[in-house]
Amino acid sequence: MNYDCLIIDDEEVLARNTGEYFNMFDVKTFVTYSVAEAEAFFKENDASLLLLDINLGDGSGFEFCKKIRESKNIPILFISARNTDDDKIIALNIGGDDYIEKPYSLGVLLAKVRVVLKRYGAGLDSSDSSGADGKVSGTKKEFVDGNLTIDYVNKKVFHSGEEKKLTSLEYSLLKYLTDNANRLITKQEIFDNVWNDKFTSDGTLNVHVRKVREAIEEDPQNPHRIITVWKEGYRYETEEGK
C-alpha cells in the first residue's frame, strides 16, 4: 500500500496524534515507533515522505536515513527535540531535506508536509524550461553544459559521464539554478520556487548548495559553476556564459 507520509518516532503519543491529524486532513499517514517497525513497513508498503526522529529506541534516525538513501530518493524531514547546529548539519549532510524542532505546531508541520508532497508529486516534466545557455535537445529532455548533463526524463545528473546521487530537493535546486543560468538568483527566490514555503533557513540552503557543488564542481571549494553572490544569492554560470 502507498502512503503519503510515514512517521518514525518513539514518542508514541506525539507520533499517533500527528498521524491522526494528518489523516484527518487527507494526508494518508502510517505511524511506526521504531526502526524495526519502519523496516517491516517498507517490506510491504511505500511512502512518499518520511518524518523521522533521531533518537529511536532500537536505533538511530541518522543511520536509518543513510540506509533509506541507498534505495529511495524520497524527501526525509527530521523531527527532533535536539536543537544543536551540529545535529541539523549532520541531518542535512546525510540526505535529510529539512529539520523540524520539537515541539512543533501540527498545523505548521502539516503545511510543510503538504508543500513537499505537492512539489515532488507534481515532478519536473520534460517540457520545463532548461536555461538559455545550456544545450537542450529538441524535445527538451536534457540539459548539457560542458561535462554536466541533467536528464529531465529520469531526473538524473551526470558529471563527466558518472551519475551523481542527489536527493529530490538537491535535484530541484540544481534544476532551478540551471533553468535560470547566468543571472543572479536571490535566496528568497530560491525559497519561493524550490522550497515553496517560508520556513527554510539560510543554513539549510547553504548545506544543500554545498552538496550540489560536491556533485558537479571539479573543485567544490573553488566553484566555477554555482557562484555565490555575497549577501544576495547564487548564479549558475554556463561555460558559454563565462
Image (tube, rainbow, N blue to C red):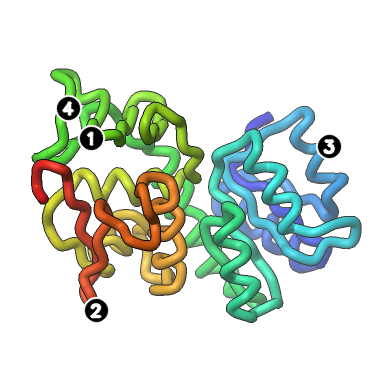
Position of the N terminus, as image quadrant, is top right
| Residue 93 appears in the picture as rendered | yes
Read off the residue under disc 4. Answer: 136
Between disc 1 and disc 4, whose residue precedes? 4
Q: Secondary structure at mark 1?
A: loop
Q: Residues within 10 Å of mark 3 (few under 14, many from 20)?
A: few
Q: Earlier in the sequence, mark 4 or mark 3?
A: 3
The x, y position of residue 64, in whole percent, is 74, 50
The residue lying at 62 percent from left, 47 percent from top is 5
Which of the labelled discs sits on residue 76, or is there none? none
Count neighbours of disc 4 (C-alpha within 10 A) and say few if under 14, some if 14 to 19, many if 20 or more.
Answer: some
Q: Can you tell which mark lies on residue 231?
A: 2
Say above or below: 41 vs 176. Answer: above
In the image, residue 182 lies at what x, y percent?
12, 52
Three-letter amino acid code of the residue under disc 4: Val
Q: Position of residue 214 (x, y in %)?
A: 44, 51
Distance from label 2 to label 3 (Cα)?
46 Å
Label disc, if present, on residue 146 of the rendered structure? 1
Q: Are marks 4 and 3 in contact (CB under 8 Å)?
A: no
Position of residue 55 measured from the top left corner of the image (x, y, whole percent): 80, 66
Q: Are marks 1 and 4 in contact (CB under 8 Å)?
A: no
Q: Residues within 10 Å of mark 1 (few under 14, many from 20)?
A: few
First-in-chain label (2 vs 3): 3
Tag 4's secondary structure? strand
Disc 1 to disc 4, C-alpha distance: 12 Å
- Cα separation, mark 4 vs mark 3, equals 43 Å
**Of marks 1 and 2, the one in the foreground:** 1
What residue is at 57 percent from the left and 48 percent from the top?
A: 27
Identify which amino acid the numbered label 1 is placed on: Gly
Q: Is residue 113 above or below residue 40?
A: below
Q: Nearer the viewer, residue 74 or 105?
A: 74
In the rendered structure, which amino acid carries the disc numbered 2? Lys
